[in-house]
Image (spheres, rainbow, N blue to C red):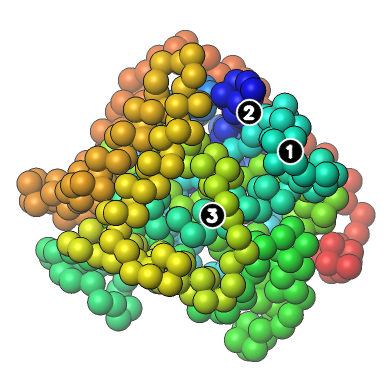
Amino acid sequence: MPGAGESLRGGRRGIEKESLRVTLDGYVAATRHPAAFGSALENRFITTDYSEALLEFVTPPVASAWEAIQYLCNIHQFVFQALDDELLWAMSMPCMIRSGADVPLARYGTSNVGTMKTVYRRGLGYRYGRNMQAISGVHFNYSLADDFWPAYQALEGSRSEATEFRSAAYLGLVRNVRRFDWLLLYLFGASPAVCKTFLSGVATNLEEFDHGTLFGPYATSLRMSDIGYQNTNQAALNVSANSLEEYTRDLAHAVSTPNPDYEAIGVRVDGRYRQLNANYLQIENEFYSTVRPKRVARSGERPTEALRRGGVEYIELRALDTSPFDPVGISQVHMHFLEVFLVTCLLMDSPPIDLDEQRDNQRNHTMVATRGREPGVALVCAGESVSLSAWGHELCDRMQSVAELLDAGGEGSYVASVAAQRALFDDAERTPSARLLADLKTTGQSVFEYAMSLSLGYAEYFRSMPADMNAHFAMLKAESSASVQRQSDIEAADELSFEAYLEQYFS
């Protein structure tokens, strides 16, 4: 594949990082979205996720991991200039939640689109509980360069239309991520322990670590386990990634099929919307998956419509815990490895996934989330039992050649990223989850005390940075102001009632 390394290196990457605002004593902040950040509805770089307290930082797609980290660092520095009496929680799993009422719904103004976003979040609270919606993580967005695709299509000997070929290749990548997402939980999972307050009244198999902490002795990511984002109603959806047609069909079916449990909640009760509808999914974004094929939607366009219109544009990887060992929750080394991983998933064979393999994939995912560091832990590959360590090394072997392609003429950072992660398959004590538990034992701190100390340290780190070191400060300030005006314009332009708006959106 002539010029393969060059065209592969032309990809774009971006980060979405969720950060929970907390008070100086560690409780979820009850304050409104700070005015200094502008409109959560319209700001391109600083918005909110489920809760008014759950900030989401968004970098644009950029040409290098370094640029993405710099953007993310500058957003953090900008944010901390306005958080005088609050911190950003340094871990994925929140603490000090007495009840779901402690997690305030995000607000987006009076427009129909803003109201829809808030009602959707209210529905998530009714369906899954508000506690779960305070969990945070990091999403890695990635796309291959435009000039990669013609060369790759020629190499594959495909006569498909270019957009169809690209979408089919991206769906193959998605299937392989579903096969191998356990690897990401093992390497990057950083939530083996959780505050007792988060699981108050919930029966679990977790053990007591200390007076305030529950943990899984060999867990990697409780965030990605059944106490985190997993859900029985969604587990029954079986959204296929075997083709773009099947993926959009299955999502559209879930968004239009009533669920008896959600019908029991009610949609509009005493004149107030509890949820957008009573279907398995209120909207497509409710479907939780470790990876999503994406296309930027036009105004008023649903995600499935955007995919059908223009095909897959980029991949959103959603399996990453916030790294407590990095001030912005992710590092350049992580990003280089994730890029190698995704390109490897694209280039590897990726046959369709049947229901049996889907069950094996889910079993592997759950096993690694809850017991991934257990000595001798075995997973299922092609119906056969295989040790996690052996399979991890095999995948790293495959990634090595891709890393060398990406590094051609460079500094060796991609090869180094694979070497750094490969070492974790030889020594589970070097994984983030094991390091975190070791830190708790060494310091004698509960997970709450440990996370508080990290959060305070990172706050000081960013607050000590002078604004003139922030190359994006002026842009972020301008965007905050402009976003308020854009929200005002949207609200002024509304002509439909909210009921009519929903009917039009779902028609």
Secondary structure state at the residue bearing disc 2? loop
What is the distance, in whole Å, between disc 3 and disc 1 at their CAs?
Answer: 19 Å
Say which label, 2 or 3, has the lower sequence index: 2
Q: Examine the image and state in which quarter residue 388 appears.
A: bottom left
Could you tell me which residue is drawn at 58 percent across and 45 percent down? 346
Q: Is residue 448 above or below residue 228?
A: above
- The amino acid type of the residue labelled 3 equals Asn
Of residue 456 and residue 230, the one placed in the foreground of this image is 230
Q: What secondary structure is found at the residue carrying circle 1?
A: helix
Number of numbered discs on residues: 3
Q: Earlier in the sequence, mark 3 or mark 1?
A: 1
Classify 405 as above or below 218. Answer: above
Please give the name of the residue rendered at 74% of the width and 58% of the height, measured from the top-left corner. Answer: 244
Question: Mark 1 belongs to which amino acid?
Answer: Gln
Q: Nearer the viewer, residue 474 or 397?
A: 397
Q: Position of residue 321 (x, y in %)?
A: 39, 50
Residue with the mark numbered 3: 176
Eyeballing the image, is 359 above or below 308? below
How far from the left and from the top, in percent, is residue 448?
23, 54
Q: Nearer the viewer, mark 2 or mark 3?
A: 2
Image point 37% across, 42% down: which residue? 396
Residue indicated by mark 2: 1
- Percent coordinates x, y for residue 193 in the rendering: 25, 59
Judging from the image, what secondary structure is the residue with disc 3 in?
helix
Label 2 vs label 1: CA separation?
A: 11 Å
**Residue at label 1?**
153
Mark 2: amino acid? Met
Q: Is residue 133 visible?
A: yes
Q: Toward which corner of the image does residue 148 lie, by quadrant?
A: top right
**Where is 279 relative to 157, above or below?**
below
Question: Is the Cβ of the residue at disc 2 closer than 8 Å to that at disc 1?
Answer: no
